[in-house]
Image (spheres, rainbow, N blue to C red):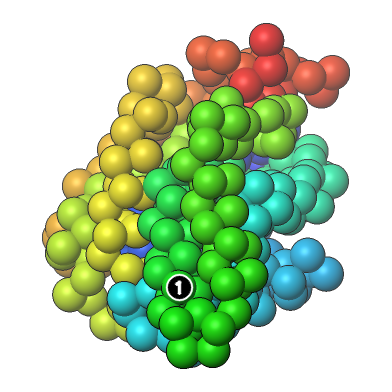
Amino acid sequence: MKGFTPKRGCFVVFEGIDRSGKSTQARLAYERLVKAGYPSELLRFPDRTTSIGKVLNSYLTQGTEHDDKGVSEKTVASPQLMHLLFAANRWETQARLLRALGEGKVVVADRYSFSGIAYTVGAAPVVAQAAAREAEARAGKSGEPADVAAACALVTAATGSPFDGEFCRASEQGLLAPDAVFYLDITPEEAQKRGGYGDELYEQLAVQERVHGAYKQFEDLPYWRRIPAGVSPEALHEKIAEELKLVIQQTQPDQPLKAKGDAAGSDGRKRLWEM
């Protein structure tokens, strides 16, 4: 890829379940762009350096203190609250993202709103039910039925009708839409075999299976590009590099890629799920 500075900039996102290789591939793509002369920037979500990001980091890493069959209800907050915190973390970066794109940069993001929705819809019921089971077991030993009621309330919140894709999309509505999403598709069983699996709260097979299924709702988005990820990192990177080159070539100044269900803002850029 030969570098140039597109006036409009270009926004690409890497998505996938845990251990699909998205963080590695996002980094490799960014490094390749820089080497080729493209002004570029790398973003990671959640951004754990912000005030909200630090809360999220504590929530995600606390889950590793428990065994892989469940998560303490003391660790699991309301699923609605957690989704809104993840969404707020993405909103925190919008000014930085707009500024980078306005400077003509290629912005590479490791996760974005699609992860937020897939993980909330897919993971929340499993995590909340695990919390309820552990609370019930604890109550049998300590006689604290209030803990059971609180944990069961999480299950109700996670599985009730208000807690669906529509609820999740509402908090993402208006965020900048990407020019392309590279979805690294790998089975949860294959991902489980990779190093470091289980280090964070959601890295449980039952959770990842539901999240993998939840990602299917995005398949019809015109900027969604499914990339089979069950190959070597090197081979995967070369495939992505080919796709990324095409995306940048197609991203012309003042001609944002159109996306079904998205609307353009005053800056001419598409927004997520605005009608």
Confirm whether residue 256 shows in the render. no
Q: Tell me where residue 3 appears, x and y as whole percent.
A: 54, 48
- Residue placed most toward the observer, 72 or 184: 72
Q: Amino acid at mark 1?
A: Glu
81 and 159: which is toward the camera: 159
Q: Which residue is mark 1?
A: 136
Say which quadrant the C terminus sits in: top right
Q: Mark yes or no: residue 50 visible.
A: yes
- Outermost residue to the front: 143
Q: Residue at x 15, y 64 (%)?
A: 190
Q: Is residue 257 left or right of residue 96?
A: left
For the image, the number of numbered tags is 1
Crowding at mark 1 (Cα within 10 Å: few <14, some 14-19, many 20+): many
Q: Is residue 55 above or below residue 111?
A: below
Q: Up-down: is 16 above or below 73?
A: above
Residue for point 57% across, 72% down? 145
Residue at (20% x, 47% y) in the render: 228
Residue 225 lies in what quarter of the image?
A: top left
* Residue lying furthest top: 275
Asked which secondary structure carries label 1, the reply is helix
Q: Position of residue 110 (x, y in %)?
A: 52, 57
